[in-house]
Amino acid sequence: MDKKKQKHEEKRGQAKRSILINMIIVPFIPFILAIGVSFYFFTTALENNTTSSLKRIVGDHRDMIESFLMERKSDLELITKIYSFKEINSNKAIDTIFKNLKSRTGAFIDLGLFDSHGIHLKYSGQYQLRGKDYKNELWFKEVMQNGYYVSDIFLGYRNVPHFVIAVRQGGAEKTWILRATIDTLFFDKLVSQVRIGRTGESYILNKKGVAQTGRRSGGIYIMDKDSEFSDFPSLGNNIQTFINSDSERNKYLYATAWLKNREWLLVVRQEKKDAYKSLYSALYISLIIMVIGGAVIIVMAVYMTERILKRIQQLGQEKESLGNQLIRAAQLAEIGEMAAGFAHEINNPLQIIKSEHALIESLLEDMSGNIDAEKKEDVDEIEDSLDQIKLQVNRCSEITHAILKFGRENEIKEQLLNPRHVIPEIIHMIEKKAMVNGIEIIIHISEDSPEFKGDPSQFQQVMLNLFNNAMDALSEQHGSSGGILKIESYKNNEGFLVIKITDNGAGISPENIEKIFSPFFTTKPVGKGTGLGLSVCYGIIESFGGTMEVTSEQNVATTFVISLPAIN
Amino acid sequence: MAKMRIMLVDDEERYLQTTKKLIEKKGFEVLTAQSGKDALEKLKLQNVHVVILDVKMPGMDGNETLKAIRTLYPLVEVIMLTGHATLSSAIDGLKSGAYDFLMKPADIEIIIEKALEAFEKRQRLEEKIRIAQAKKYMRSPREILKDDEE
């Protein structure tokens, strides 16, 4: 029994697991797919968008800086075209020209005139540079060679970082050079004016990685070497984007573009966290949705699984009990038929035995007159023996008659019975016996107890059988006082008449309760019961179209419940 | 009053013998027959008052025999002896004119008691017939010659 239970439990556990897994996985697959796919497309779109906007910014900025440099160059070229060397070299003329230039743009901080030997002839500005020899300076060599030069930032004689734009004019010995210094602050502002998000910034490095403008976020100042430059991937001519991390492991999104014939590199960068801010918030939202959705799915799955299992179990039980009822009914019908035939066949030999017995008895009676005293004892014993034969034959015939009743061959007169009249009448028949045994009878027959159809004597037989069983159980348990026999009847929700007979007697053990309606099953001592009573009752109630059930708790109570279809 | 003559009809030979002895001991005359056919043969030859008839017999069964007896010898009373399974056929028997039925196994005293009741009924019936006939004879004495053999 325990093993069976265990196996059943195991099976239930398996079913539960597989239902639960299915209930979780099946909704999870589309759920994860939907979130995953939308998240993927969203992030790629966002990434593309971010990179392309960064590219656009770096491109625009490059063009802007290039045109700034070109304009400054043309400023100087304009001067060299308007004025001759003599004019510029004349007393104080350069101060006037520089004043005019400054009124055009604030980008210049000084202006100088050089001869072909690199001697600073005239100077207008805040430093004392006149007369200095620039013959060996890089910018001088370059401008002499190319006619035009924009330098990197350098310290020079003034020992302050700056860069210059120089243009050459004239030829051979008459060559002269006009040079202007660009305001570093002005240029710095111009370059760093890019604003993207919270951390977006731009700056210029030369091709060796030395900063030409400062970085807004700090770390690199003018003329510092950018330590991260060496980590940059090899850069082509076009605008490039890449991701690089600094010494503190913060990741940055970079976009770069060459300026000035690959002399300078314009760098625009933004912290990745900042650039992908909306991406991260999307990620968090997705995660929250996933967690909540997952939790909802799991909770629903657990709840549904419990419900499904409960329903399955309920159906299983219903099926089992229905199956048991069907089997029992079929068994009873079969046994009934078989037993009836069998009983009938037994009756014939019983009849002969009875006749033989009667004959012996009467012969013995005839003889007893002329028997001497010695043999009188034997004769008495024979008579005793004969009495036993008679008794036992009667017992047999009682059994066969009970079986034949079980076979339901009696003529049945169905009629409408009113429980409110019939039940009290039957109870009346047992009142005396109950009183003698000290049994209290409680009757609750509700007014709405509906009428039912059945044979009155059969119904009486059922009731008396149940009452007598109950009273036997009560005497066994309580002796001559304390027994309670309760008889109830009412109309249940399905419109059936329910009759309940409850006693607080010895009860029925669980192993017996399964067999209680089986023919020939009895717990009474040999000769005291045929074991047919309850099976006959069961058959009768069934023939009325009703059902009969029993529940029992040992030493507490036993209840027989009869349900009969009501006739309105 | 005449002595009651009983005929036992049953397929069990031993039962017939024993019961015959028992009833004879009580002082009644007993005939036995092992089948319905046998019974009808014997009824032709001898006057019987009460027939105790087993319902279930091979060949001609109790009910057929009963019908034949009631048709051929309407004055003969029949008591059916039945096992329970054939109770419905016993009811048929009562409808076809059996006096009563008994359930097997029946005590011999009860069989005799029932037989006597039936015999008395028959006696009363014969008495009535005699009285009626006497009245008829008084009206027309010639009738006596007609029904002499009766």
Image (tube, rainbow, N blue to C red):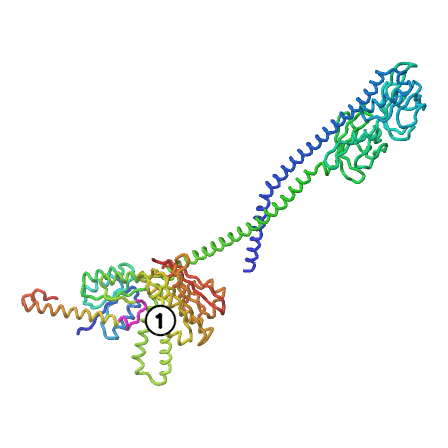
Report in which chain the residue with disc 1 lies.
A
Whole-percent x, y for residue B118 in the image:
22, 69
Whole-percent x, y for residue A432 in the image:
37, 75
Name the residue that disc number 1 marks: A428
Q: Is residue A91 visible?
A: yes
Residue at figure coordinates x 35%, y 71% from the top left: A429
Bounds of the magenta segment: B103-111
User: Which is nearer the eye, A191 or B100?
Assistant: A191
On whether residue A511 falls in the magenta region, the answer is no
Q: Is residue A525 visible?
A: no
The secondary structure type at the circle numbered 1 is helix
Q: Is residue A179 above or below residue A557?
A: above
For disc 1, the neighbor class at 10 Å (few under 14, some 14 to 19, many from 20) is few
User: Which is nearer the eye, A82 or A45?
Assistant: A82
Question: Which quadrant would residue B92 be assigned to in this image?
Answer: bottom left
Amino acid type shown at disc 1: His
Name the image quarter holding the N terminus of chain A.
bottom right
On whether residue B104 falls in the magenta region, the answer is yes
**How many numbered tags mark residues here?**
1
Whole-percent x, y for residue A376 in the image:
35, 83
Whole-percent x, y for residue A276 in the image:
70, 37
